[in-house]
Amino acid sequence: MKPIKTLILILICCLSVFFLSESAAGQDQLISDGKNIVENYLQEKSITLDPESVEYAQFLNSILWGGVAELSKAGTDFVKDQYDLGALEAYCIETVIHILYDDYVPGPPDPPAESYVEPQSSSNDENQIFSYSRSLAIQYAKDYYDNYNSSYPAFTSDCQNFVSQIVRRGGFGMTGDGDGCRSENTYSEWYMIPNPDPTIFCLGEGRFFEWSTAWTVVDHFKWYFTYNNSFAQNLGWTSSHSTAASMLAPGDVIQLQILGSDGTWIGSHSVFVTKEDSTGLYVTSHTDDYLDKKLSDIPLSSSKRLLLIRFP
């Protein structure tokens, strides 16, 4: 009897390895096909991008969130069907994470927005530190969505920098004072300040400023405002545009998350809600530089979702 059991266990193990190998091979083929679609598009449009550069990753990120019309839906000259769309998404997500988030350290998991329960009382002493004006924040977004404010640096990937500027104009004060050169990796401080006389060793994009990553990095912004402080509420994630519309209003922030191969959700884009009507929310952003884009035009999937942040 024992030899039969042993044989069965060996057979199960062999089948498991076989199916895992087949699955991995299928995913590799999917990613390769997605890469071919991007390369064909760039060649057709005579666009030259270094495939290891931040600019390239940002281009792929724009594809993911509907910023490149011919690559954001099936039925175009470049994306024939749903398989192509899935292949493109798989390649874009893998490459964006590889270039921009290779050393990403996950924070607390986000709850589903559908399970969010309104607190009995909204009074919170921390929230009284700053008075947030939604109207001032919205007006700033409208004024500077395509006319960058020279008081701040403009980055290749500028979405979170812009959202921080908006929230700052709404009334939130900065905390922290820099560490001498460019970015400080922290989500316990939130600041962007001039550095008019950087040392010769301080090089790179934005060298005439100092900032915390809570100002410029999507997830760090969330952790600063909703975990380290109670300045805003993390309402959780959703894959439904209508759920977002029912829970947020103009003056709030939406982060767009992608799913890594290890099961970690990473914030890859940040937008600001500037308008609403009976059909839903409209958002404004930098990098792709748009005003009042319909939220429902941003494509979602099992690997792309929304994270909702409500301000007071």
Image (cartoon, rainbow, N blue to C red):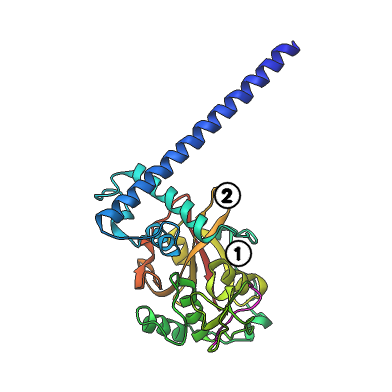
Q: For the residue labelled by badge 1, is the local secondary structure a helix, a strand or a loop?
A: loop
Q: Is residue 194 magenta?
A: yes
Q: Residue furthest front?
A: 200
Q: Identify the residue position indicated by label 2 in the image.
A: 263
How many residues crowd mark 1 within 10 Å: few (<14), some (14–19), many (20+)? few
**Residue 62 x, y percent position in the rendering:** 39, 62
What is the spatial separation of the Cα atoms under label 2 and label 1, in whole angstroms?
A: 26 Å
**Residue 89 x, y percent position in the rendering:** 41, 50
Q: Left of 273 or right of it: where is 110? A: right
Q: Is residue 303 magenta?
A: no
Nearer the camera: disc 2 or disc 1: 2
Q: Splitting the image into 4 quarters, where does residue 275 fall? A: bottom left
Q: Splitting the image into 4 quarters, where does residue 101 fall? A: bottom right
Could you tell me which residue is drawn at 29 percent across and 59 percent down?
69
How many residues crowd mark 2 within 10 Å: few (<14), some (14–19), many (20+)? few
The answer to whether the residues at label 2 and label 1 have Cβ atoms under 8 Å apart is no
What amino acid does circle 1 point to? Val
Q: Left of 141 or right of it: where is 267? A: right
Could you tell me which residue is drawn at 61 percent across and 78 percent down?
231
Which comes sooner in the sequence, label 2 or label 1?
1
> Which residues, given as a range, are shown in magenta?
186-195
Q: For the residue labelled by badge 2, is the local secondary structure a helix, a strand or a loop?
A: loop
Q: Report whether residue 114 is seen.
A: no
Q: Report whether residue 94 is seen.
A: yes
What amino acid does circle 2 point to? Gly
**Residue 44 x, y percent position in the rendering:** 25, 54
- The relative height of residue 292 versus residue 96 in the rendered view (above or below) is below
Majority secondary structure of magenta residues:
loop
Q: Identify the residue position indicated by label 1 in the image.
A: 117
